[in-house]
Amino acid sequence: MKYQHIKTSFFINNRVKLVKKLLPGSVAIINANDELNRNADQNFPFRQNSDMFYLTGLQQEKCILTLCPDFPDKKLREIVFTIKPNEQLETWTGHKYIREEVRKISGVETVKWLDDFDAVLRDLVLNSDNIYINLNEYIKYQTDVAYRDNRFATSIKEQYPAHNIERLAPLITNQRLVKEPEEIKLIQKACDITESAFRRILKFVKPGAKEYEIEAEITHEYLMNGAGGHAYQPVIGSGKNALVLHYIENSGECKDGDLLLMDFGAEYGNYAADCTRTIPVNGKFTTRQRQCYEAVLRVQKKAIKLYKPGNTIDKVNKEVWKMMEKEMMGLGLFTKEDVEKQDADQPLYSKYLMHGVAHFIGLDVHDVGGKYQEFKKGMILTCEPGLYIKEEGIGIRIENDILVDEKPVDLMENIPREVEEIERLMI
């Protein structure tokens, strides 16, 4: 295990809070993620389902958690099912959890092998009225491939058509939105490792450097500091590549006079950091680049103050778009008169800032929660205004992770973003 130990009490408390939200006479089933095929007999590196990790801390594939708080036999009210270790399996793929390890990590006392799952589940279900299934309900998620929880839901509906099927996702989402102290500490650690990577990059970048070389430097710093790797596929875009919001090819060359936009973040203990910084490849902003950069930075500093209880992403977006509209006029991209004549459905600012400026962050880089969700103390969101001027080859975004409070806390306040500091560190 690369990351610091997370107390078992954290996972126990998460389950206690969740079962209180279930209807009487219910069973909830949470599955581990699939192992996904890469090619031939090779799989992609396994990453645990975020809800499974949140409730158990288990990092192993082929695990199932059942919660049945009203079941007559107290020993079966919460169960972890997992693969049975055997010598041949461990020779090829390494150690698998024994029962005592599952108990120690998760705090779940009853641990059974997957061979017992179907029979035990039938007992749980037939003693329940409601079955909670756990699906990915992130609003932007779409896939042509049925994932494990999706396939499981289909199977449950076919086997038990007379039962009431309930959604577990809204209940877990409600819990995961507000971060516990343990989670804040892990996200801060991810942010600190991300800071180390950025400071390394400031010394590395120069004209002629390849985007993939920069990605490699970041990866090295992450792994050397105990991170699991990247929290998401990093964007390392120089010149015109910085204008592509989700550019991940990272194959270009950094040229003298260009800006380099890097959207990157470490994952530590399954918790994500999400940072964006924009720097001059040659270590010195041009006058125009500096004007544009400082316009975005001014807006970000003002926007961070909006991350208070009671606000929403929707409201923050609208406020920041107004701020950026004013800055764009100051940069000569359009005039006040142009704004007065603009089509309200296609505002002029949207040509130069076409995305929202906040999303929740936690176990997922785009964590649970929607744009109308009211902020509460303890939530963590990104603040990422940007400016993209295609005609001038300028792409700028500055992104920090913010802890919601009456006085918002910037978890990335130590990651350089001032022009003078960036230029000084790149010497």
Image: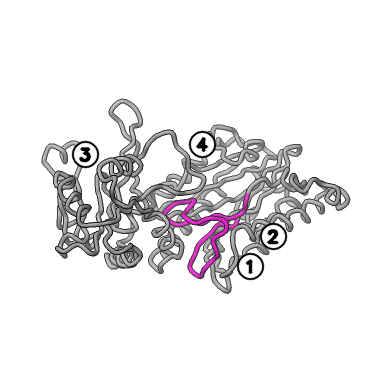
Give the crowd class for mark 3: few <14, some 14-19, many >=20 residues within 10 Å: few
From the top left corner, tell me how far across and down residue 316 is, in percent: 64, 60
The kind of residue on which mark 1 rests is Lys
- Characterize the magenta stretch by its predominant secondary structure: loop
Q: Which residues are magenta?
A: 356-383
Look at label 4 and name its amino acid: Tyr
Horizontal and vertical percent for residue 284?
Answer: 69, 48
Numbered circle sitting on residue 93: 3
Residue type, mark 2 in image: Glu
Q: Residue at x 86, y 53 (%)?
A: 336
Q: Earlier in the sequence, mark 2 or mark 3?
A: 3
- Residue with the most extreme left position: 87
Residue under pointer 4? 212
Magenta highlight on residue 74: no
Looking at the rendered structure, the kind of residue marked 3 is Thr
Q: CA gap, disc 2 to disc 3?
A: 52 Å
Find out whether residue 364 is within the magenta segment: yes
Q: Secondary structure at mark 2?
A: helix
Dot 3: what SS? Answer: helix
Can you see residue 226? no
Q: Which mark is residue 319?
A: 2
Q: CA distance from mark 1 to mark 2?
A: 11 Å
Q: Which residue is mark 1?
A: 305
Among the 4 quarters of the image, the one containing residue 242: top right
Q: Are marks 4 and 1 in contact (CB under 8 Å)?
A: no
Q: Nearer the viewer, mark 1 or mark 2?
A: 2
